[in-house]
Amino acid sequence: MSTPVAGASPQKARFVTGSTMRHVLVMAAAGSAGLVAIFVVDFLNLFYISLLDDTSLTAAVGYASALIYFYTSLTIGVMIASTALVARALGAEDRPYAREMAGSAIVWMIIVSGGATLATMPFVNEQLTLIGATGEAHSVAAVFMWIVLPTTPLLGLGMCFTGLLRAVGDARRSMYTTLAYGVVIMILDPLLILGLDLGVPGAAIASVIARVAMVGYALRILIVKHDLIARPTVAHVMRDFRPLARIGIPAILTNIATPVGNGYATAVIAPFGDQAIAGWTVISRLIPVAFGGLFALSGAVGPVLAQNFGAGAYDRVRSSLNNAVTISTIYVVAVCAILFAIQSWIVSGFRLTGDGASLFEDFSTYLALTFVFAGGLYVANAAFNNLGHAKLSTLFNWGRATVGTVPFVLLGAHFHGAQGALAGFFIGGIPFGIGALYVAYRVTGRLGDERPTRSFRNAMADWFGGTRARGDSAAGG
């Protein structure tokens, strides 16, 4: 274990006392600010490219984004595991183990993200063809991928560091980490895309530089301010593989489900032309901006659940879940009202015509309301991942990406073209949001059958070694 950094200020778990609603709101607000900043600049990125007046370039960004989402999902899965385990250890007041786990998680993040990048880089063209890219859109998307893809490990580290800051309860600096990424892109995008006339490759270069800035800022805070990272050793890295994998592998599979579903929808919409793909791309980029608060909420409630779970405060776990569902529902209704009011501005601003305009109008008028149910799924995912039931997240998300996507999109496209495919994509997910939330309430309702009395480190060893008692299974596994 590394020697503690002089001047660092280790803190006790923040979420095991005080109002759970306040904790969830503060974490979600900070997370929303950072995430929405990233998504806003991505949206502006698309706007700058649309000013080049070439629909194929907008489509190219859509194809590249669909693939990059796959790699982002890998890093999110590892981040979820590291955040959950470090937060649980802090909640159980086992800070040495939390530091060791943080160090191990960083190593495994590099291995997973770097390995995936090396394994798939030779097949960029084939991947783009698979999701329907052709002509100039295919060529431009390939250039974007070749610039951005090698820096996937940097993206992974940035995600991991953000999660560790949330695990320790530092919502403000977690927000600053993502804001650093957003500010760099906000400055560089217009300069590189329009000023230097680099177009789509300019957007890719800005993303690479922003990833470096995000990693540099967060790493300094974690080491100097919180002393949360122990120097990794081979023994610790190998020891921690199993607990990380038990949460991380299902979480990775869970997060891969979304780009798989999106990729399938992209492939079905692609034959309807570049106008339809342009509309789908604008929707895909707008969703994180409009509903970034939902994504932030699922990440924010996780550490609150995990710290209280580690402390054995199961009533607070249930209260936190209720708080998250309430916030999610109110947020979605408010966002849908705004989208309905501004839809015509977005259609004209992004020069959407034909099928592209129709798709966006359908989304902002009717289909955005389905995020009430998607929000339930996101909150349920946070509960499953942080309470020892990560496989349930995998089950519900893959169900949504397959059974809830393929037949609905196919039937919709058959009867109503691109608009039908879009409607099928969103409507098919409704049952899975309802089902996931129902099961999450069942899981939290069974917590507390036996309050754990062992040290966190020993409990974790038993838990992931398969020797825990039935009561422990009910409480967390």
Image (spheres, grey):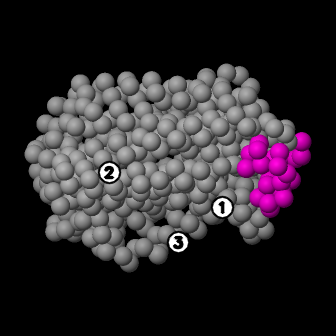
**Marks 1 and 2, how far apart at CA:** 33 Å
The tag earlier along the polypeptide, 3 or 2, is: 3
SS of the residue at dot 2?
Answer: helix
348 lies left or right of 179 = left
Pointer 3: residues within 10 angstroms few (<14), some, or many (20+)? Answer: few
Q: Quadrant of residue 374?
A: top left
Q: What residue type is labelled 2?
A: Phe
Q: Which amino acid does label 1 sit on?
A: Ala
Question: Height in image: 460 above or below 452?
Answer: below
Q: What residue type is labelled 3?
A: Gly
Residue 274 image position (x, y, % from top left): 15, 56
The kind of secondary structure the magenta stretch mainly shows is: helix
Numbered tag placed on residue 245 in the rendering: 1
Q: How many marks?
A: 3
Q: Which residue is drawn at 25% across and 50% down?
A: 412
The tag earlier along the polypeptide, 3 or 1, is: 3
Q: Residue at x 66, y 61 (%)?
A: 245
Numbered tag placed on residue 115 in the rendering: 3
